[in-house]
Image (cartoon, rainbow, N blue to C red):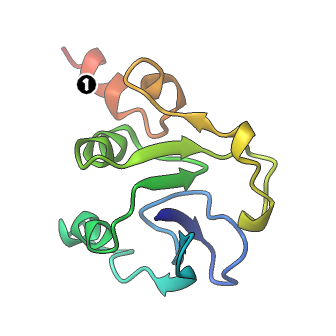
Amino acid sequence: MILIPVESDEKTIAQGFRKADKFVFIDKKTGIMVQENHFKSDKSPLFFTHFKTYNVETLYVKNIGYKTYLKLIGMGIEVLLIAEDVTYYTHIDPSELISLTDSNAEIYCTLGHHKQSKENK
């Protein structure tokens, strides 16, 4: 299952992940399902557990924080970055996605959590 954060119009890709209005779940067998983000304003661990319930294997996202990336990778969810110029999830070209890995996550992740911890040492 692929997960994509979207705005309330259910088409526009959200700029962030955790605070997205809704999520699009795409499954090759069952099709597309859109669900409201019930954990938008809360740091509940259920936010992540919820995605395992739906067997999410891959996340397509424009921006993601480093700590969130680490949590998802730890759960076995692959994180792929969508190009900034792509507006709607229906226009994503899989060949243009950037796979986040331990070697490039600190470059591509937002919020600088990894930089803050290194600078504070």
In the image: residue 70, left or right of residue 95: left
| Residue 89 in the image, given as x and y percentages of width and height | 71, 65
- Circle 1 packing at 10 Å, graded few (<14), some (14-19), many (20+), is few
Q: Looking at the image, how many numbered discs can be counted on the residues?
A: 1
Compared to 39, does 2 lie above or below? above
Quadrant in the rendering for residue 119: top left
The x, y position of residue 66, in whole percent, is 37, 37
Look at 22% across and 67% down and name the residue there. 49
| Near-viewer residue (106 or 31) | 31
Q: Quadrant of the C terminus?
A: top left
- Return the residue nearer the eye: 74 or 32: 32
- Left/right of residue 12 with respect to residue 68 in the rendered view: right
Q: Amino acid at mark 1?
A: Ser
Residue 44 image offset from top left, x and y in percent:
20, 69
Residue pictured at 46% horizontal, 67% vertical: 19
Q: Is residue 114 left or right of residue 78?
A: left
The structure residue drawn at horizontal position 32% and vertical position 68%, both measured from the top left corner, is 51
Q: Helix, strand, or loop for circle 1?
A: helix
Find disc 1 in the rendering and name its residue.
Answer: 117
Rendering coords of residue 102 (x, y %): 37, 23
